[in-house]
Structures are given as C-alpha cells and as structure tokens.
Amino acid sequence: MNGPKHDKGYADRAIDCQEAVAAGIINLLDEAEEAGWDRVEAAKAIVNVAIGVHMGESGTDPEE
C-alpha cells in the first residue's frame, strides 16, 4: 500500500488514502465472491463494517 504523498495534511490526502486502500477492497470483494457471497452484499457489508470501525476509532460509538 502506498503511503501519503506528504507528511502533513494536504488538499487531496483523503482521495490519496481512498486510492491506496481501493486495491485491498477489490481483493476483499473478490475473496467474498469466491466464498459464495454476492459482490453487492459484500460491498454493503464492507460499508457497514467501515462505519462501525470509524465510530470505534473516533470515539463516537454509542455502545462504548
């Protein structure tokens, strides 16, 4: 995975991060499909998991 282009914040940092993780997400979708899951349902699951992880990491999970 590629890291940020600069050490400090910059305008396209979020886009660069999305591009960096995209290949891993596509691989995860491929693995899910090989295991028998539909790609769309797997993508929805990834979104929901990502939201949960974000809430936990940012301290906004109401169950914490």
Image (cartoon, helix red, strand yellow):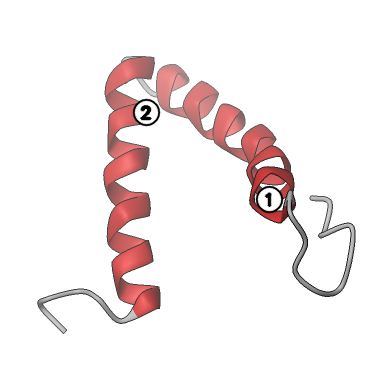
The residue located at (37%, 52%) in the rendering is 50
Which residue is the extreme one toward the left?
Answer: 63
Vertical position of residue 47 compared to residue 12: above or below: above
Q: Locate residue 39 relative to residue 63 in the image: left or right.
A: right
- The image shows residue 20 at horizontal and vertical percentages of 73, 44
Splitting the image into 4 quarters, where does residue 7 fall?
bottom right
The residue located at (32%, 15%) in the rendering is 38
- Secondary element under disc 1, as helix, strand or loop, is helix
What amino acid type is highlighted by mark number 2?
Ala
The residue located at (16%, 84%) in the rendering is 64
Which residue is the extreme one toward the front?
Answer: 11
Instruction: Kindly identify which numbered label has been placed on residue 61.
Output: none
- Secondary element under disc 2, as helix, strand or loop, is helix
The residue located at (63%, 35%) in the rendering is 22
Foreground mark, 2 or 1, reads 1
What amino acid type is highlighted by mark number 1?
Cys
Vertical position of residue 55 compared to residue 41: above or below: below
Tags 2 and 1 touching, CB below 8 Å: no
Splitting the image into 4 quarters, where does residue 15 fall?
top right
Splitting the image into 4 quarters, where does residue 18 fall?
top right
Of residue 11 and residue 57, the one placed in the foreground of this image is: 11
Disc 2: which residue? 43
Label 1 environment density (alpha carbons within 10 Å; few <14, some 14–19, many ≥20)? some
Lower sequence index among marks 2 and 1: 1
- The image shows residue 9 at horizontal and vertical percentages of 75, 69
Disc 1: which residue? 17
Mark pair 2, 1: CA separation: 18 Å
